[in-house]
Amino acid sequence: MAYPFTRSLSKYSPLVICYESSMIIAWVLSLLTLLSMLVMQLERLAALEVMSVITYVETQKAFIVVEQSILECEKYLSNITALDSPACSIRSSGKNLWLISSKSKPSLETLIFLDDKTNIARRLNWRQKFE
């Protein structure tokens, strides 16, 4: 003997199956939409990471170039006229103390002690100047 509830469901079973299948399709479509949004976000993140690495490499190269120019100025500190076209500005900062600043970006500043007897320059400190 069949229960009355199951008998009434059997009359509407095509509608129930259609409703359930449409819900499953909607659920699958929502998952696909979420996955596509995730892929878009990952692509954006990867692009930002590439830009960040490129910026870091370019900044390091510029920093090395500026450091080389400061080292050249430091090397010829006892004979400033030997520099053809100095890429830095040199100012006296006291007795045997010299302040060397780079003219290009990134702007670096170093404080140098120049021994009069030996003409050896020693770097006391350095800093990056921000504008």
Image (cartoon, rainbow, N blue to C red):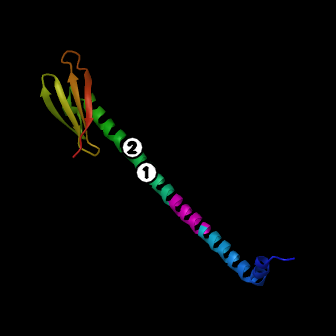
Q: What amino acid type is highlighted by mark number 1?
A: Ser
**Vertical position of residue 41 compared to residue 63: above or below:** below
**Of all residues shown, which one is farthest toward the bottom?**
11
Give the crowd class for mark 2: few <14, some 14-19, many >=20 residues within 10 Å: few
**Pointer 1 residue:** 52
Label 2 secondary element: helix
Instruction: Name the residue nearer the viewer: 32 or 2.
Output: 2
Q: From the viewer's perspective, tell me whether residue 11 is left or right of residue 72.
A: right
Q: Which of marks 1 and 2 is nearer the N terminus?
A: 1
Q: From the viewer's perspective, tell me whether residue 27 is left or right of residue 53.
A: right
What's the magenta bit mostly, secondary-structure-wise?
helix
Q: Which mark is residue 61?
A: 2
Label 1 secondary element: helix
Q: Can residue 85 be seen in this view?
A: no
Q: Does the magenta stretch include residue 114?
A: no
Give the crowd class for mark 1: few <14, some 14-19, many >=20 residues within 10 Å: few
Q: Does the magenta stretch include residue 38?
A: yes
> What x and y, as percent, mark residue 126?
26, 31
Q: What stretch is highlighted in magenta?
A: 31-43
Q: What amino acid type is highlighted by mark number 2?
A: Lys
Q: Residue at x 28, y 35 (%)?
A: 70
